Amino acid sequence: MVRIAQQNDWVVFIIIGCIFLYIFMFRSLQRDATVKEFLLQQFPDATNNFLSWLIISFVFSLLFATFLSQFIPTVPKAVSDLHFFGFELNRFGFTFFSVLAFYFVRNLFTYIFFAGTGTIKKWQIFYFTAAKFYFFISMLLIILCVAAYFYDLDHHRLLPFYFWGILFILFFKLLYYFFHPNGIMPEKWYYKFLYICTLQIVPILVLWKILFF
């Protein structure tokens, strides 16, 4: 039996592209700040917060889709039947656009959540604080993508670790949001409960259903 070597050059290009995006962000948008300075900077001293958040969000979506696409069983027929200039979405393309749409819709509803709860002034502080969290996770995703695509790992045995790792990150993110010194979440407890249910649990379940069912 001949084993065909898997070509993972596209993963290298994605990782290099993400690194260059971060270099551009630090040199141009963050005024040559170091990673440590970026993570420790305070909101009044920060610059170009929205553009930095957009870049970090795009990089996170790209890397997360790269890592997750290897576990996608198949592309739904309704999606594979769609052709753009003679091309159709593969597993990575389907995962990437699903994650990107998920991230965009959830952030749109997060903005509506802040506006509806009378805490719209916290919106800028929210995405400033969230950007630091997703920047750290994107660094972790680079390591995971390298390990997943360029090392001979038994992913079936590692699936439980991936699952519990994702749950831990989600739990840590909630603690990070709720207890951050910037006070980015509404003070009333029922607004926090609403945020967990409608903007954390439900969107993730929807994304899971789209990708795996």
Image: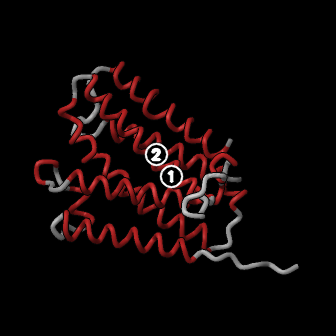
Residue ranking furthest to the right: 1
Question: Marks 1/2: CA distance?
Answer: 6 Å
| Percent coordinates x, y for residue 83 in the rendering | 60, 57
Q: Nearer the viewer, residue 141 or 91?
A: 91
Q: Are marks 1 and 2 in contact (CB under 8 Å)?
A: yes
| Percent coordinates x, y for residue 137 in the rendering | 42, 56
How many marks do you count on the picture? 2
Q: How is the image coloured?
A: secondary structure
Quarter of the rendering occupied by the N terminus: bottom right
- Rendered view: 41 above or below 27: above
**Residue highlighted by disc 1:** 97
* Left or right, residue 92 beside residue 54: right
Other-residue count near label 2 (Cα within 10 Å), few / some / many at <14 / 14–19 / ≥20: some
* Left or right, residue 195 beside residue 184: right
- Rendered view: 136 above or below 210: below
Badge 1 marks a residue whose secondary structure is helix
Quarter of the rendering occupied by the C terminus: top right
Residue at image point 37% right, 33% down: 109
The image quarter in which residue 5 lies: bottom right
Other-residue count near label 1 (Cα within 10 Å), few / some / many at <14 / 14–19 / ≥20: some
Residue at image point 39% right, 56% down: 58
Give the residue type that dot 1 points to. Phe
- Rendered view: 115 above or below 106: above
Residue at image point 27% right, 29% down: 114
| Percent coordinates x, y for residue 121 in the rendering | 17, 33
Where residue 101 is drawn, which disc sits there? 2
Give the residue type that dot 2 points to. Ala
